[in-house]
Amino acid sequence: MHNKRYNVLLICVDDLMPELGCYGNSIVKSPYIDSLAARSAVFTKHYVTVPTCGASRYSLLRSTLPRTKAALGNEAAKILSDPETAIGNEPETFIEQYRRNGYHTVGIGKISHSPDGYRYPYAGPKSDQRELPRSWDEVSFNPGKWGHGWNAFFAYADGESRITMQGEVPPYEAADVPDEGYPDGLTAALAVDKLKMLARQEKPFFMGVGFFKPHLPFNAPQQYWDLYDAGHLPLTAVPNIPANINLASLHNSAEFNQYRLGEESAALDQPLSDGYARKLIHGYYACISYVDAQVGKVLQALEETGLADRTVVVLWSDHGWHLGDYRVWGKHTLFDRALRSVLMIKTPAMSRCKVVNRITSTIDIGPTLLELCDLPPLSQADGRSLIPLLNDVQDKAWADVAYSYYNHGISMVTPQFRLTRYFRKEQPVIELYDHATDPLETRNIAERSPDIIRQLTPLWERGNTGVYAK
């Protein structure tokens, strides 16, 4: 890594589980991301710290595990980056560390929780208060005909949104519109134009680009729906509730059910019909292909401007998503399906894919980028630089463990096990899954495995930040 003044392009994709060609899904059409993966380090066991958008992104930006209830919710950045409550002189995010060290920082779209970088409620009106007041030199977003960020986030092709329609909308849409007929197409165009401008300046840059899809609603141009034959899309391999758990570990898909014109409501007591489930999976996959094409435009601009040979590219998703697994439609659980997400990192020196089958966490991304660019680390960071794994995927010093927090529980994953302990009254409060024999987490074996739990508990305790302390 010779030129330490690398630029950085961070691409954030909302609700994207690792169901891409480069992750082994032969059905999903994701050629542009797959092309990036072919020249990147692809992390197959990357886990987020919190399976909800705002908290996961805050953890990314701060490189920290959650220690307060505020750090577990979508308002994390709004509450904890409030300039009136800032403590000391620490950078509010690792992006501010770039800004303090001579980088021009640009945020386009959804990087923290807000879709446009400003703090205001879903129903608006848009404020002039930034969600991350010290991190960006500039934030940019084109809300198009939807008017402001949150309307654009829940956009339908006619200019309405889930908000303006007060939930009287279906959870999917296939409209005969070009890419710019939905907001992610406008975001890609903004990012392409900004890269052309940045290529003309001497100052190094950090640019974050946040795309909305495949977040609900599953709305994408018709051409991306046409890539799939809905009748042949596979349903979940785990349609039933895991054995030996309490239903409190799951949920009744409240976010999904906010779209009240869907054909069926989701609930734990019975699965959706196969036909409707396939329609939803079709929509999710169409959205992946749509956002893949937008990512492709940005990556092409990086090449065409000559910036690629001095820019580190990171593609990251804020969590996974249950497509009917355990009868859940959404994120918000401490199961692998919600916690494992996409992460790939490409440095200018890389020319081929390096598959990294080691356990990593979202909190490791910031320390990695700062070290790649020879910038000071964040003193409060809990994460570890991934550079040892970029150099040697077999690095023996790497500790394969990641911690996640949600739903009154703390979950730890190791190469073989997932151990989750809930701080609640509903029993059982301990869940143990053996990924060697049960990678889909269908059977909690905690009750018959006291020795394994005893062995794993000291390591689990290292992730107990006290966030659920009474």
Image: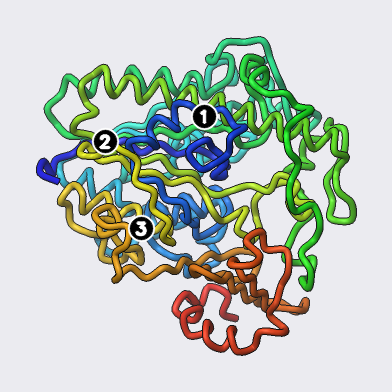
Q: Earlier in the sequence, mark 2 or mark 1?
A: 1
Identify residue type, mark 3: Asp
Q: Residue under label 1, please give it.
A: 30
Q: Residue 386 occupies which quadrant of the picture?
A: bottom left
Amino acid tagged 2: Ser
Q: Residue at x 39, y 44 (%)?
A: 344
Residue at 56 percent across and 71 percent down: it is 417
Q: CA distance from mark 2 to mark 3?
A: 23 Å
Residue at the spot x=56%, y=51% of the render? 74
Residue 238 left/right relative to 24: right
Foreground disc of the pair 1, 3: 1
Mark 1 falls on what kind of element? Answer: loop
Q: Dot 2 corresponds to which residue?
A: 351
Q: Are marks 2 and 3 in contact (CB under 8 Å)?
A: no
**Picture residue at 32% right of the left edge, 57% below the top:** 393
- Badge 2 or badge 3: first in the primary sequence: 2
The reply to whether residue 147 is in sight is yes
How far apart are labels 1 and 3 at the CA level?
Answer: 25 Å
Q: Is residue 81 at least partly visible in the picture?
A: no
Residue 352: mark in rendering: none
Q: Residues within 10 Å of mark 2 (few under 14, many from 20)?
A: some
Compared to 273, does 299 lie above or below?
A: above
Location of residue 466 in the rendering, given as x and y in whole percent from the top left corner: 51, 77
Tag shown at residue 364:
3
